[in-house]
Amino acid sequence: MSADRQAPAERPLLEMRDVARFFDVSPPWYQRLFGGGSRRVLRAVDGVDLDLPRGRTLSLVGESGCGKSTLARLAVGLYPLSRGSIRFDGMEMSVRDGSFAERRTRRRIQMIFQDPFASLNPRWRVARIIGEPIRVHEPGTGEAERRSRVRELLEMVGLDADAAARYPHQFSGGQRQRISIARALAARPDLLICDEPTSALDVSVQAQILNLMRELQEELGLTYLFISHDLSAVRFISDYVGVMYLGRLVEWGEAETLFRNPRHPYTRKLLESVPNLAEPGRARTPIAGEVPSPLSPPPGCHFNPRCPLAMAKCRTDTPGMVRTGPGGVRCFAVEEETATA
Amino acid sequence: MTSQHPAGQARRLLRPVARLWQSDLVWSFRNTPYAVVSLALVLAIAVTALCAHWVAPHDPFDLASFNILDSELPPAWVEGGSPEFILGTDTQGRDVLSLIIYGARLSLLVGLASVVFGLVLGVGLGLLSGYVGGWVDALVMRTADVKLSFPAILVALLVNGVARGFLPPEMHGQIAIPVLIFSIGMSGWVHYARTVRGIVMVERRKEYVLAAQIVGRKGWEVALLHVLPNTMSPVTVIATINLATAILLEATLSFLGVGVPPTEPSLGTLIKVGSEYMFSGIWWVTAFPSLLLVVLVLAVNLLGDWLRDALNPNLQ
Amino acid sequence: MLEVRDIHVEVEIRRRRLKVIDGVSLSLARGETLGIVGESGAGKSMLGNAIAGMLEPPLHIAGGSVTLEGRRIDDLKGEELRAVRGRRIGMVFQDPLTSLNPLFSIGDQLVETITTRLGIGRAEARRRAIALLEATGLPDPAERLGHYPHQFSGGMRQRVVLALALCLDPVLVIADEPTTALDVSVQAQIIRLLDRLCREHGSAVILITHDMGVIAEATERVAVMYAGRIVEIGPTERVIRAPRHPYTRGLMASIPPIDRRPDRLAQIAGSMPRIGTVLPGCPFSPRCPSAVARCHEAIPALAGGNGHLAACWLDEAAS
């Protein structure tokens, strides 16, 4: 580990403090009135603290319902926060006032999506799709200049210049994902939120996109917030990893440390459940049970019903984040272990 | 280099046409005989009607041109018919063929105008409702429900009655057609609104719409630039089928006497006027406009059916 | 037990006939587990559907034969086909909801299937259904018999589908991406279950997936498909450790390793040709890093010893 990695020389680009987002999923009031049923709140993200250093990649992993996609959408401002704050480059982003300053800052956070077939407007030509951020944020740009920017961007993501005149349906999934990346880059962002960008792609195409993302990061100094359930893709792309379970961050830290020495029982189980190609025929050890519904998570530590280390305390109390090096773990068992050691 | 070459230039200009010709939609059209026949019929009727002034053998508005002696002549091929009036004449001696051509023109114009009116209203409300949601959505959709519980004819009669009540009698003639268009359009908007709302609610959650928001587009820009164009295929289908309904409704209302004033020939008024003489043996005055109405409505409907299948991605 | 010989599947879209599967042959012994792996568009699901007689028009078998236990099944129709498919072949799909009728309780569906196909009484069928569900690890099977598919979680539903697929002791189970829609932690459970149940029932398995990890874990032999053809087939361990076809090599290399962080992943340039692309040579030749002139001219056949075959001109066995 090099020295500059450990020294927090500058302020993180993205700082999340106690970020939470609740969704009201109650039936409409007239149904509640006549058919019974009560108010129900989905705590999609419930109190997450994270820092994302400039020029690095932080990945969020977890199974369905863990809130990682919601957190991504909160970071990009698609939903308002229910609680907490998000600061981007020192600026408070949780207040949406629609001001010029806010718009100018928002431009610097862009997003790429999971489904390459839904993320491009099917009725727009590629040139218009990639040119849109330029049109919005640099309205003074002339037609010719915009066209040459689009050509540059296409080249940057590895597509031919003649792609500009075509429609999205004429491209394969991987090529569409490149177009998506080019559109995000057109806004000249600092932070790119990547919501499962390779989950819908085949492995050989995934490798192309992951390589491209790392090249672009090096070239443009981009910061990535990478959301995925695929641990091997995460391993390749990340400097830092956060593990989420039912709306909470249960462990985070430097990727290297987390993959070599996972602390939280859930992280350990998750890593064990990845099939290992180096040992074909070896059966994985599955985690017992399934992820409970996020509508009614178990009390205490949400993982307790599936946890091999669960104690009485885990069923009633919620563990706090214990700092371990640059990262942290939320687990009573780890807490005790650290205390006795 | 080749761009200077005239042949190359022509080829470039023709390329979009060639691409259209090769497109799936056109291919499907070329391989669906009933669609080809329907379109041909609709086009033939529409072109004839629009060029009524030049095509019609007589001018039914030129009082000087008809002769009472020519009245009630049967079609040319029936005994007593005259080759001058192929489809016979009515009780005032007007040429039935010319009446039909002019009548079709008015019917088509009223139909088209009311479709456009209903479409703009319905698509606008549907977009608003689906995109904004909340109480706006509830208001629009409940209004639509209320509207649906009235038969179209009742709405038209109501609008008509109100308009007549508020305006001086001498204006009735002038406002009759706008009122007709308004009332037929009012009866059609709900279909557009509901369909568009449904699509908008699906589309606005799609990632390309989110992407446009993140890029920094304002809400109404996203709605108009991104969401609206993607609702157009089903709207086209509804509009086509709605055209058939609108033409029929115009005929019905005119037949009931609350549509086009009897002095103006539309398919509906012609059928109405003709029907009064049907039992005295003068069948042709009402039969030919009815026949044309049936053919026109059927053709438009078949066209709409084909379009719905051709634009349905699930059937491709 | 299962013999697929030179099968061709075509689809007629608009005015064109496109080849989806182009001459695939394979055989499966009783109780064996064969994996079929490939990327989207390789035709792996079509192959599964062709074997099970589940191709929907405009897809159809354009040549070749499928023989199950010595009986040709590719030309069966109507009731005969349903009898074979229901009795001898069990199907598991990616989305469990496609295999379950949402309007009937899972108990009704299981009991109905067992009574109609095996001709035993309802009480006996019910007992079998409970035993089966218990074997799949579903908690309280007797009580949950009355539940409807939507009342189960994804993993539990896939367990029910497995029970339904195995309730008639089929000789062959075709599982098409059975774990793709599930969470990683549940994936491993279902793969283990599939493995155990098929062993218990003596059923052979064709496991179709895009996930090399699942193949590595659960299959004895694997066929790698590319553009409608098998490009490599052999014992799973050998195919993974020492792949012979450049496509398999590229595929294996492009999977990011879990135990280290390389600077760059090996990648295969370009993407799979669109369905219906006709090439005179090896379908992989346009993307192949080591293609020679011959690769662009003629299609190589599967060749090799010890049951490990590859279709590549550069492979020693071919030359």
Image (cartoon, coloured by chain):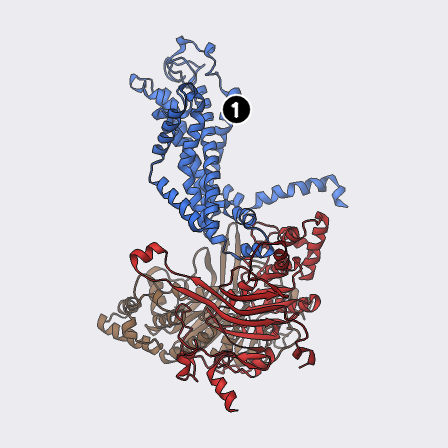
Please name the amino acid that badge 1 sits on: Cys
Side of B112 where A203 appears, left or right: right
Q: Is residue B40 above or below residue C96?
A: above
Tell me where residue A225 appears, x and y as whole percent: 59, 68
Chain letter, colour red:
A
Q: Is residue A183 above or below residue C206?
A: above
The residue closer to the viewer here, A92 or B310, is A92
Tell me where residue B119 appears, x and y as whole percent: 47, 39
**What chain does badge 1 belong to?**
B
Is residue C31 something one can see in this rendering? no
Total numbered circles: 1
Tell me where residue C202 appears, x and y as whole percent: 37, 79
Disc 1 is placed on an element classified as loop
Side of B173 where C282 appears, left or right: right
Q: Residue furthest bottom?
A: A341
Tell me where residue C150 appears, x and y as whole percent: 35, 65
Snapshot quadrant of residue C148: bottom left
Snapshot quadrant of residue A102: bottom right
Residue visible at 68% across and 43% down in the picture: B12
The residue closer to the viewer here, B171 or C184, is B171
The 10 Å Cα crowd at callout 1, few under 14, some 14 to 19, many 20 or more, is some
Chain letter, colour blue:
B
Q: Is residue A303 above or below residue A90?
A: below
Is residue C200 something one can see in this rendering? yes
The residue closer to the viewer here, C93 or A13, is A13
Chain letter, colour brown:
C
Q: Which residue is mark 1?
A: B51
Side of A329 where A178 appears, left or right: right
